[in-house]
């Protein structure tokens, strides 16, 4: 029989759960910087594990020395990127006026006017299709500077917390065996083997995935840079950098990158003759970028998205598509790692399921 005392205790328990949940969320919000450091350190650990194993197994280094050497590689790469790229990106951004929203709007209006003049010279009534004033009122010209500033701000913030990230990464790499031993004490004995096997496979697959992803972005950046240098586009580094970063977003990112490259190429040629210089240069760049995407889609992406995580390309495409519909761009970015984790867990805990057997036969 349900009494008023039982109901009262239930209400009090529910209120306590709600209060503890709110307090927990608030606490996580307050330490969000620490959580970011932990996430970045975890990613670096996943990327560094293959190097650590190589130094230990192939070169026979001690575990501590291999860890220090792996961390040293990260330090060299991070400082190399900061020293070589950040000043160039910042200076070229200023040359393109990418940090000034009003300047972008002014330049965009000038480009629209040039396009109008060009089309009207070929007896096309362009103002019937679009008007520069109405288009400018609908466009958010703060997207590009906000995007660039967010990237530079992230790099700057990461620089401020670099010591913390490297310190955490060092112990993630050095004491990973201790973490496993500690985890064993917390894991129920009935599921210990399954959970540890899952963690081992997830670590292996995601390490391959993130290394492959970095390699893909670097290859795409170099190819974009070559295209821009071939056609003599000013401020090539910033354009190639922005477009390469957009490739983190599967499938949609390259399309956005091509549009962005066309716009930035037009901005680079602002003041030049539209018909003989600006338009041809933009078309050449777009064709070059599409060629890069053909190379990337048929070589780089299949290797990274299918072989590195042992999934069929069509399977990966559908996962990214569904994640995009459900959770937007962020869902597309994290779709492959999360799907890989779910596949590994499914194989370990539900090995008799026929669908899971089909999806995980290569893991």
Image: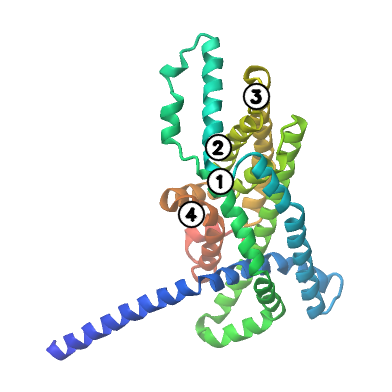
Give SS at disc 1: helix
Mark toward the viewer: 4 or 2: 2
Residue drawn at (50%, 44%) of the image: 142
Residue 24's quadrant in the figure?
bottom left
Residue 24 in view in this figure = yes
Residue 203 in view in this figure = no
Residue drawn at (69%, 54%) of the image: 214
Mark toward the viewer: 2 or 3: 2
Give SS at disc 4: helix
| Residues at marks 1 and 4 touching, judged by CB atoms closer than 8 Å | no
Q: Earlier in the sequence, mark 2 or mark 1?
A: 2
Q: How far apart are marks 2 and 1 (CA)?
A: 9 Å
Q: Earlier in the sequence, mark 3 or mark 1?
A: 1
In the displayed structure, does residue 108 sit left or right of residue 267? left
Q: Name the residue under label 3.
A: 278
Where 38 falls versus 95 (above or below)?
Answer: below
In the displayed structure, does residue 127 sit left or right of residue 232? left
Q: Name the residue under label 4.
A: 331
Q: Mark 2 points at which residue?
A: 104
In-front residue for pair 232/297: 232
Residue 145: which numbered mark, if any? 1
Mark toward the viewer: 1 or 4: 1
Residue drawn at (81%, 71%) of the image: 69
Q: Which of marks 4 and 2 is nearer the N terminus?
A: 2
| Residue 189 pos. (x, y %) | 53, 86
Where 275 falls versus 310 (above or below)?
Answer: above
Residue drawn at (41%, 52%) of the image: 326
């Amino acid at each position: 029989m349900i009494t008023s005392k039982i109901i009262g205790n239930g209400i009090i328990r529910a209120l306590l759960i709600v209060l503890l949940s709110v307090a927990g969320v608030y606490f996580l919000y307050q330490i969000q910087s620490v959580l970011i450091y932990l996430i970045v350190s975890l990613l670096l650990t996943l990327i560094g594990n293959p190097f650590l194993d190589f130094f230990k197994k192939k070169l026979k280094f001690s575990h501590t020395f291999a860890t220090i050497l792996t961390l040293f590689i990260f330090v060299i790469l991070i400082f190399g990127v900061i020293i070589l790229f950040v000043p160039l990106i910042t200076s070229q951004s200023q040359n393109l006026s990418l940090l000034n929203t009003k300047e972008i709007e002014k330049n965009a209006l000038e480009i629209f006017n040039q396009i109008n003049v060009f089309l009207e010279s070929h007896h096309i009534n362009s103002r019937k299709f679009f008007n520069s004033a109405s288009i400018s009122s609908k466009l958010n010209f703060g997207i590009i500077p906000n995007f660039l500033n967010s990237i530079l701000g992230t790099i700057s913030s990461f620089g401020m917390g670099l010591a913390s990230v490297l310190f955490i990464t060092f112990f993630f790499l050095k004491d990973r065996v201790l973490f496993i031993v500690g985890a064993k004490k917390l894991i129920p004995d009935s599921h210990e083997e399954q959970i540890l096997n899952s963690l081992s496979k997830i670590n292996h697959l995601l390490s391959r995935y993130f290394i492959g992803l970095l390699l893909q972005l670097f290859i795409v950046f170099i190819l974009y840079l070559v295209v821009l240098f071939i056609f003599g586009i000013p401020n090539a580094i910033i354009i190639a950098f922005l477009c390469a970063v957009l490739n983190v977003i599967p499938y949609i990112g390259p399309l956005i990158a091509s549009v962005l490259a066309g716009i930035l190429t037009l901005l680079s040629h602002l003041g030049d003759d539209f018909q003989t210089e600006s338009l041809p240069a933009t078309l050449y760049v777009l064709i070059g970028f599409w060629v890069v995407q053909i190379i990337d889609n048929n070589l780089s992406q299949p290797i990274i998205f299918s072989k590195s995580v042992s999934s069929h390309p069509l399977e990966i495409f559908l996962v990214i598509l569904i994640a995009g519909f459900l959770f937007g761009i962020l869902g597309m970015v994290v779709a492959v790692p999360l799907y890989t984790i779910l596949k590994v867990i499914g194989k370990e805990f539900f090995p008799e399921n026929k669908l899971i057997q089909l999806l995980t036969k290569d893991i």
